[in-house]
Amino acid sequence: MFVLGNFLIAIANILDIVLSIYMWIVIIAVVISWVNPDPYNQIVRLLYSVTDPVFRPIRRVIGMRLGPIDFSPMIVILAIIFTKKFLISSLMELGYKLKGGGII
């Protein structure tokens, strides 16, 4: 069972890294949106192409009910934090229990 435990721990670590990188991408996209960037810049286009598919459903649900401020990045960041605290820590704990060593 230690192999399955190591596999779950590795998956949890990779997910943690990917979610951390995506959270920083969201933060950078928000900061860039404040300065009215050039829409033809490749970096700006990359940031928007990576973040807009996640923001779009949230914007559709919330709409303009909360005023002109876009809260979708904050909701995405809170969802990432929740996922990191709940799902990843649960996977790590399960991996360590399957490994037989308990939580380190």
Image: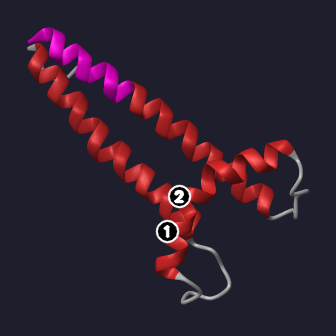
Rendered residue at 50%/80% (across/down)? 62
Would residue 61 be visible to someone looking at this image? yes
Rendered residue at 11%/23% (across/down)? 97
Q: Position of residue 34 (x, y in %)?
A: 80, 65
- Image: 98 above or below 72: above
Would residue 101 be visible to someone looking at this image? no
Instruction: Report which quarter residue 30 is drawn in.
Output: bottom right
Q: Amino acid at mark 1?
A: Pro
Give the residue pinned by disc 1.
57
Q: Position of residue 39 (x, y in %)?
A: 86, 57
For this rendering, which residue is in front, 103 or 77? Answer: 77
Quadrant, the N terminus: top left
Rendered residue at 56%/67% (across/down)? 56
In this picture, which residue range is highlighted in magenta?
1-13
Give the residue pinned by disc 2.
54
Quadrant, the C terminus: top left
Q: Position of residue 92 (x, y in %)?
A: 25, 28
